[in-house]
Image: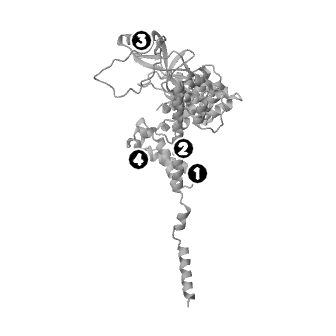
Amino acid sequence: MTAYRLYLKSCPAVMAALLCEEPFEEVPDVAAVKSSIMQEVRQEWQVVLEMEASDQLGPLLKKHCPHTDWQCYREAMTAVEAAQYTTTPFCRSVLRAWFPSFTQSANVEEQFGCMQDALKRGTKSQKGSMTTLSSLAVKALNQKVLQEGQAEPVTLTAKDWEGPMTRGCDVPVDKILSEFVSTSAHNHNRSTLNYMRGFIMAKRQEVAFADAADNFWVASAMQRNTLFSVDGKFFLCVGTTPGIVNALPLRELEMVFRGPKPEEAVDEEHVPCKAPVWETTEILQADQTVKALTLRRNTPMVEELLLDFCQVQCYDWTLHVCEPRIADKLGSAVLFRRCEAAKPLLVWLMSSHGIVKVLSEALSRILSSYGARLRQNASKSQKIRTLMKLPVVQEGCSSESLDALDKLLTAMDDKRRKKTKQTEEDEEEDEPEAWEFMNEPDEAWTGAKQLLEMLNQEDDP
């Protein structure tokens, strides 16, 4: 759902909202929303023009955001720019041409499916002429969207946009959101739109576009539920997208945590059969003191961050719930208790064994950051074992933790080899052996053998 929301809130799809004129219940102040959208469009277009004007940044933009070359993007953006970022009649006509209300129908995908099915049945190699495609589009339009017996041209309402096929089907949400190759822009823009958000954020933070692009991979190395700090500010990672980390901002309180947690009271009537899965080693010693952290009351609550690999510092942490009277003063009942010493992101990934979830490409970038060399086609386990030998990892991780990680990598390698061997055996079983062909009956060979026997019988006196 987040990916669909991203597509509808990004250019050029978000510009369809500029055609809205009348307020409605969900958005009473349409003018303020349109002004905010126009400001975002201006910022994005300035980023695109600035990068395209540079010989070094132009290829970088085309690599990460190829959708900026599409006609639907450039024509809408240039029309708004020519109108000085106001909705003039000319600007509205261009936007209405690209975003007619009819194409917002929920049955557009059904029309494309009907056209694709007709091409498979009636043409070779699924190739059709423009005349054929136009005819199929009109036929699909009448079958999937228009009501039977309706006059043409027709004025459609919101109910008519659904079409008879949609109202008659009970489609599960999981089926709609399933990952499949489709004609929707959502399927093609999931990565490029996130990278564009990263460039816009870099412009806002006065970070060089090239430096921002070099750190897009850091988001793939971040793990959910990681407590980290950047420039003295604390955050809790709640998810990542290509290039950007979504995190909850935290604030320090004057309240402090001292020493280890108190021992848990033993309830002899309710004795657990095994230790809780969340049980962790103590993160604070008796002489250590840290300030408590709680959620920062912001709007929006989740912040988008563009991180630098060298600036991220991670912490072990525990979660606590305070008393109601304290919660009323703080505005939150949740308190975070962190360890005193921070760990670099690599050390944190090693100690938590989250390094095994990091993509191979990100591992290569981490190796490059620390100046370690390894062949290009090295396996994921080899890259992790090379990182384990770095001095910063040896100093920051215990030998027991590294030994456990090494055993985990060995188990992963064994599982991969076993799976590869099983796949090869299955492929060999699918291929018939030579002796199987030899044992198959051959009518020509049988006939020749019978003919030889008859000739031998005739030759015998």
The percent coordinates of residue 130 (x first, y second) are: 58, 49
Q: Is residue 14 visible?
A: no
**Residue 287, placed above or below residue 238:** above
Q: CA distance from mark 2 to mark 4?
A: 63 Å
Q: Nearer the viewer, mark 1 or mark 4?
A: 1
The percent coordinates of residue 241 (x first, y second) are: 53, 29
Q: Secondary structure at mark 1?
A: loop
Mark 1 surroundings within 10 Å by alpha-carbon count, few (fewer than 14), some (14 through 19), many (20 or more): few
Residue in the foreground of this view, choosing between 130 and 434: 434
Q: Residue at x 56, y 63 (%)?
A: 434
Disc assigned to residue 129: 1
At label 1, the amino acid type is Ser
Q: Are marks 1 and 3 in contact (CB under 8 Å)?
A: no
Q: Earlier in the sequence, mark 1 or mark 2?
A: 1
Q: Earlier in the sequence, mark 2 or mark 3?
A: 3
Disc assigned to residue 149: 4
At label 4, the amino acid type is Gly
Disc assigned to residue 330: 3
Mark 2 surroundings within 10 Å by alpha-carbon count, few (fewer than 14), some (14 through 19), many (20 or more): few
At label 2, the amino acid type is Arg
Q: Secondary structure at mark 4?
A: loop
Residue in the foreground of this view, choosing between 427 and 153: 427
Q: Nearer the viewer, mark 1 or mark 3?
A: 3
In the picture, measured across the screen, residue 277 lies left or right of residue 458, that is left
Q: Residue at x 46, y 46 (%)?
A: 142
Q: Nearer the viewer, mark 2 or mark 3?
A: 2
Examine the image and state in which quarter residue 364 appears: top right
Disc assigned to residue 417: 2
Q: CA distance from mark 1 to mark 4?
A: 29 Å
At label 3, the amino acid type is Leu
Q: Is residue 383 visible?
A: yes
Q: CA distance from mark 3 to mark 4?
A: 64 Å
